[in-house]
Image: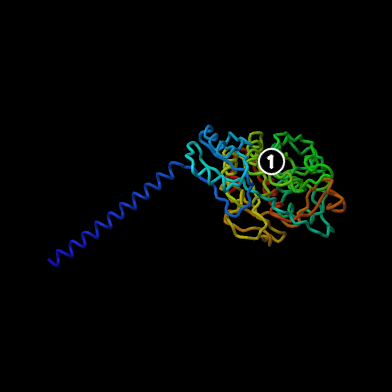
Amino acid sequence: MKNLKYILIALLSVLFLFASCQSSILNTDEKTKTSSSNDVVFGEFNNEEIFEGRILVGYKDKNAIEKIKNTLNGEVYIEIPEINVVGIKFNGTVKDAYLKLKTLKLDGIKYVEPSFKRELIDPKPEIVDDSITKDIDGVKEDSLWGMVKIGAEDAWKVATGTNIIVGVVDTPIDAQHPDLAGQFVTGFDPVTGNLIMPDEDYDAVLGGPGDTGDDHGTHVAGTIAAKKDGKGVVGLAYGAKIMSIPIFQPDYVGDAYVARGIIWAVDHGAQVLSNSWGGGGYSKTLKAAIDYALYYNVVFVAAAGNSHTDQHWHYPSSYPGVIAVAASNARDEVTDFSNHSDTISVAAPGAKILSTIPRHSAPIYGLYNEPYDYWDGTSMATPHVSALAALLKQLHPDATPYQIKK
C-alpha cells in the first residue's frame, strides 16, 4: 500500500506537470495568435533622435494606409511607390502614435517606423603648410598626397571615369566652381521635387540671403570629379559626371526624402552613390532604397563616421552591400578619428585632404582666399572610394556592386 501511495503521488505529479505544460503551450499559442493578428513591425528608436509628428509606413496593401491616417488624424506627406512606403505627418509624438496603432488590426501593413535624424560626417578643417616641391596635374604633390598615395596617375592611364555618373548624396553643391563647372548632369531636390540644372549653384539657392549654404558637398564633389586642367585640384574620376542629390537643407531632410532621392538617382542613370553622412537608428525605408540601388547594379559607398568607436549601429554604412569607408593618413594608418567595425570594407585618404569649397566661402575659409580647403574626415575618404568605383565601372560596366566591393 505504501508503494501504491508513492506511485499515485508520482502519477499525479506527472499529470500536474503535463497540465502545466499544456497550459503554457496554450498561453504561448494565444500570445502568438494575438501578435500575428497584427503582424506589423514597429521600428525601435530608443534614444536616437527622430522627427516627432512623422512616421514611415511600409505596406503590402496601400488601402490599409487609410486606417492609420484616420487614427492619427494625419496626412500623407510623401509617397514612394517603388518600395511601397508612405510618410505620414500628424500632431503628436511617435510614442503616442505607436500606442494607438498597436491596438489596431493593421492588415496590409508591413512596418511602422520613425524618421531618424542623421548628420553629416563632420569634417575637421586643417591649417596646413602649403610649401611643396613636386606637382600632380599642376598642383603641388603634398597638397594632393592622397592621389599620389593611391597611384592616381597610373590609374588614369587606363580609366578616368568617362561616361560614369556619380550621385553625391550630400549638401547642395556649387556647380559654378571653376574646378567643377561642366562636370555635372541634372540633379534632383528630393524635398521639392525640383530638378537641379547642371550649371546651377544650388548651394547659393538653398543658402538664401547672405548665402549660408554648407561647403560639405562641394568638397566631396571635388575629390570625385574636379577637372584635370592644371589648375586648382583634380578629382580621381575627373572624367565622370556628378549628380547632386541634396539631403541636408541645411539639416537632414529625413529618411523618406533620402530614399526618394536615392531612387530618383538610380532611375536617372547614377552608377555610383557617394554618401558622407549617417547616424544611429535602423530604418527599413532607407535599407529598401539602398537595396533598390543594389538591385539595379548601383554601387553604394558610405562613410563609417568620425567617432573613433567600434560599432555596428551606424547607418547607412552598416547596411549589407554597402561599401563602408574608414579614413587613413599619409602613413597608411587608420586615423585617430575614424570609426572601426567589421562592416568596414576599406580605408582611404581622409586626413588633410585638399578639395573644392563654394566660391562664397573662399574669403572666410579658403586657402589663400581661393575656393579650396583642407579637411579631415571619413567624409573625405568616401569620395576617393566613390571615384575609384567609377573607374572600375568604366573598365567593367557589368560588374555588380558585390564585385566592385570585393
Which residue appears farthest toward the top when viewing the image?
Answer: 63
**129 lies above or below 55:** below
Q: Callout 1, which amino acid? A: Gly
Q: Nearer the viewer, residue 70 or 291?
A: 70
Q: Please give the residue where the numbered disc 1 appears in the rendered image.
A: 167
**111 lies above or below 8:** above
Indicate left or right for 185 with 320 as reference: right
**331 lies above or below 369:** below
Q: Position of residue 346 (x, y in %)?
A: 63, 53
Indicate left or right for 122 with 13 as reference: right
Indicate left or right for 44 with 253 as reference: left
Q: Position of residue 331 (x, y in %)?
A: 70, 61
Q: Is residue 391 visible?
A: no
SS type, badge 1: strand
Residue at x 62%, y 60% (from the top left corner):
309
Q: Can residue 136 be seen in this view?
A: yes
Quadrant housing the N terminus: bottom left
Residue at x 17%, y 62% (from the top left corner):
7
Label 1 Cα neighbours within 10 Å, binned few <14 / some 14-19 / many ≥20: many
